[in-house]
């Protein structure tokens, strides 16, 4: 316990933007060999360092087959929330779940942040006994506990949901929901702390995704297409909003970082109508939650020879928007088009009329665009997990989605990389030509920045 | 004794977990100074109620049970609670930012109770010797064996003096932070009150035990 608040905790997103630049990034690594052990990499992102843009440390998981995916901190700025303040907790431990194994690793980043180590492993049986859930996905440090979503039940069906972990002991406390209403699918979740509202989204049950995207289920509109709104305090389902059965897979949720604002952005992977991806705004009006489509990104025509079996008959590459991220000032929304190999930057100062202000291309199913550091090497994979620095000046992203789906869409193989963009404060993005990290034998997924980033913390003060 | 009670009230008022921080946050949510002030009222009612419960329970115990036993029990309670709070820092898990008047009363009551705000006053409620209690009471009630009404008057005075200090400081801190210092203060000036608090509880217990 500290005598003064952890310096990485900020009352508001506005203050967090004044944080010093990050020096380290933690990256979840999936072993390219399905029988191998996954790892957490430490990447040097300090531009003044001799090892800038390289992997300087790695923690191997104790077991094989975890499928590391998303992860988060034990504590963050939400610890300053006035109704349950505990500002002298340390942002210190990374909570790293295995999406396939349902095993949760607690990794200590102190005393040496460059050499983290595993201090506790919660086995799948423990998680199942205490919650009934499996396949833990998103983790958020809440005002009181650690919240984590899980895709399904022990047998791989639904319902998926949310469970709680104690932020001091890391014990799994149990299911979060008191009344789940009609909610069945789970995926991402976040909240509007100023409104005591939790928002959740839908992918599919483990049985619907683990063997790869099932074209039959997809064409029948069976994957998730709802958003759910919950009373965060009473743990009750309040409202479902249907985006329409043709809007398949409603994934990443990015609420405004300002707790007085009641809107946010959600990405939809694919429309059955035209293979487009879309971004929707959710907002509150007269006490009810509504959604509106504000961005539509079309599929791009392509030579069927270049395409995996799944896409050959369409002669087109869908953008497959699978991650989005919102800068702390709620101004820029970053959109990863994993299929077409494009990272887009939108100015969302007016959330209902976004302006496309930046775009870079790298990888892509049909295009295989190279990185400026190796301009003649075609790249596989495309922009996927994206993370924005607290000051909004740097953007990092990696190229692997999920093992079975990587193999389906990047059928000729996926070798993994991580890149960085520099952001013009007035809009516009460009590659940092010095920053190109390759992961031999692993595939990189989520990036977390030392001290916090644009998707790690939530704030109770405007 | 009255000065110390007042100062303890001030000390409780400084603790962000005792209300001013919540009031500031609610003010920021509504963007109004009025909202800050409006939140302090119910929180203070809750705090005062929590302290009053402890004070009156202790006073009636002191009237009916052997004095040294009550004194010892109070000391041990204080020390035990302080040690517990050092070992385990908990915070409420049921509240949120959307709270009404009633919710804030309950919050203030629970936070004060969970932190042992009333317990900290015990050494003064159950003074070192029965004579001391009589002496301090004789200021208002010149009687050798105090009746129930005297004990009531004593309790009301203790709670009132303590609450005055608490309310004054909470209100001033909340308004000053809201109007002038802003949120940055939270990062630099929020020392670990809980730790000091636990030590204060133990110290109060030891003091009561020793005297």
Image (cartoon, helix red, strand yellow):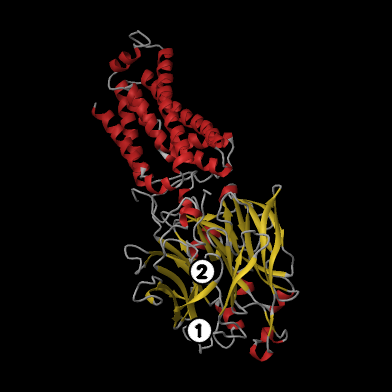
Would residue B107 appear left or right of B86 to someone viewing this image? right
> Residue A67: x, y in percent?
50, 74
Nearest to the observer: residue A253 or residue B54: A253
Give the image quarter of residue A218.
bottom right
Percent x, y for residue A108? 37, 63
Q: CA distance from mark 1 to mark 2?
A: 26 Å
Q: Quadrant of residue B139?
A: top left
Q: Is residue A201 visible?
A: no
Rendered view: A39 above or below A129: below
Label 2 crowd bin: few (<14), some (14–19), many (20+), radius 10 Å: many
Q: Nearer the viewer, residue A127 or B101?
A: B101
Q: Which callout, 1 or 2, points to the residue nearer the camera?
A: 2
Q: What secondary structure is marked by label 1?
A: loop
- What residue does disc 1 label? A415
Q: Position of residue A277 (x, y in %)?
A: 67, 72
Chain to which mark 1 belongs: A
Q: At x 43% / y 58%, what residue is drawn?
A: A19
Write down the chain letter for disc 2: A
* Residue sitting at x 40%, y 13%: B150
Residue sitting at 64 percent across and 75 percent down? A320
Q: Which dot marks residue A423? A: 2
Q: Earlier in the sequence, mark 1 or mark 2?
A: 1
Residue sitting at the far front: A426
In front here: A89 or B129? A89
Label 2: element kind: strand
Residue sitting nearer the eye, A453 or B144: A453
| Callout 1 crowding tier (Cα within 10 Å): few <14, some 14–19, many ≥20 | some
């Amino acid at each position: 316990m500290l005598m003064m608040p952890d310096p990485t905790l900020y009352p508001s997103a506005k203050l967090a933007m004044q944080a010093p630049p990050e020096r380290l990034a933690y990256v979840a690594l999936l072993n390219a060999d399905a029988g191998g052990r996954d790892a957490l990499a430490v990447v040097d992102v300090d531009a003044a360092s001799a090892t800038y843009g390289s992997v300087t440390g790695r923690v191997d998981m104790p077991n094989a087959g975890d499928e590391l995916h998303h992860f988060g901190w034990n504590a963050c700025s939400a610890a300053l929330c006035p109704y349950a303040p505990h500002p002298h907790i340390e942002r210190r431990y990374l909570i790293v779940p295995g999406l396939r194994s349902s095993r949760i690793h607690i990794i200590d980043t102190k005393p040496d942040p460059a050499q983290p180590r595993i201090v506790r492993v919660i086995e799948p049986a423990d998680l199942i006994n205490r919650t009934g859930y499996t396949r833990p996905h998103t983790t958020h440090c809440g005002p009181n506990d650690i919240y984590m979503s899980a895709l399904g039940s022990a047998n791989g069906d639904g319902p998926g949901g949310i469970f709680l972990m104690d932020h001091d002991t890391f014990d799994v406390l149990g299911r979060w929901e008191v009344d789940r209403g009609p909610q069945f699918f789970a995926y991402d979740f976040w909240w509007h702390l100023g409104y005591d509202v939790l928002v959740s989204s839908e992918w599919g049950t483990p049985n619907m995704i683990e063997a790869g995207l099932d074209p039959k289920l997809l064409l029948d509109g069976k994957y998730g297409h709802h958003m759910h709104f919950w009373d965060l305090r009473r743990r009750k389902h309040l409202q479902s909003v249907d985006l329409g059965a043709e809007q398949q897979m409603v994934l990443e949720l990015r609420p405004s970082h300002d707790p007085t604002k009641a809107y946010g952005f959600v990405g939809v992977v694919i429309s059955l109508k035209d293979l487009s991806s879309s971004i929707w705004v959710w907002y509150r009006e007269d006490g009810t939650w509504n959604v509106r489509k504000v961005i539509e990104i079309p599929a791009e025509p392509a030579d069927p020879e270049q395409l995996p079996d799944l896409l050959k008959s369409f002669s087109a590459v869908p953008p497959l928007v699978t991650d989005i991220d919102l800068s702390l000032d709620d101004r820029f929304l970053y959109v990863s088009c994993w299929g077409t190999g494009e990272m887009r930057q939108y100015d969302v100062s007016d959330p209902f009329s976004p302006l496309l202000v930046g775009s870079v291309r790298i990888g892509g199913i049909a295009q295989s665009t190279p990185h400026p550091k190796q301009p003649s090497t075609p790249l596989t994979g495309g922009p996927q997990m994206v993370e924005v620095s607290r000051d909004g000046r740097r953007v990092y992203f990696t190229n692997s989605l999920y093992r079975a789906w990587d193999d389906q869409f990047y059928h000729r193989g996926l070798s993994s990389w991580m890149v960085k963009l520099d952001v013009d404060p007035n809009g516009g993005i460009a590659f940092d030509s010095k920053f190109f990290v390759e992961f031999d034998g692993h595939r990189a997924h989520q990036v977390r920045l030392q001290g916090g980033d644009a998707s790690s913390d939530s704030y109770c003060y405007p | 004794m009255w000065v110390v009670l007042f100062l303890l009230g001030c000390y409780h008022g400084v603790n962000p977990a005792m209300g001013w921080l919540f009031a500031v946050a609610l003010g920021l949510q509504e963007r109004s100074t009025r909202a800050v002030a409006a939140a302090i009222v119910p929180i203070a009612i809750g705090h005062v109620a929590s302290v009053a419960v402890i004070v009156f329970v202790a006073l009636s115990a002191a009237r009916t049970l052997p004095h040294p036993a009550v004194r010892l029990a109070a000391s041990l309670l204080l020390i035990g609670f302080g040690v517990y709070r050092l070992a385990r820092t908990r915070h409420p898990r049921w509240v949120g930012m959307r709270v009404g008047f009633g919710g804030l009363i309950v919050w203030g009551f629970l936070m004060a109770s969970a932190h042992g705000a009333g317990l900290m006053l015990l050494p003064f409620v159950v003074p070192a010797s029965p004579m001391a209690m009589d002496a301090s009471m004789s200021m208002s009630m010149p009687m050798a064996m105090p009746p129930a009404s005297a004990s009531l008057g004593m309790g009301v005075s203790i709670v009132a003096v303590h609450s005055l200090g608490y309310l004054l400081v909470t209100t001033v801190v909340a308004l000053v932070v809201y109007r002038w210092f802003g949120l940055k203060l939270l990062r630099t000036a929020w020392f670990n009150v809980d730790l000091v608090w636990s030590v204060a509880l133990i110290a109060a217990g030891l003091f009561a035990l020793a005297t």
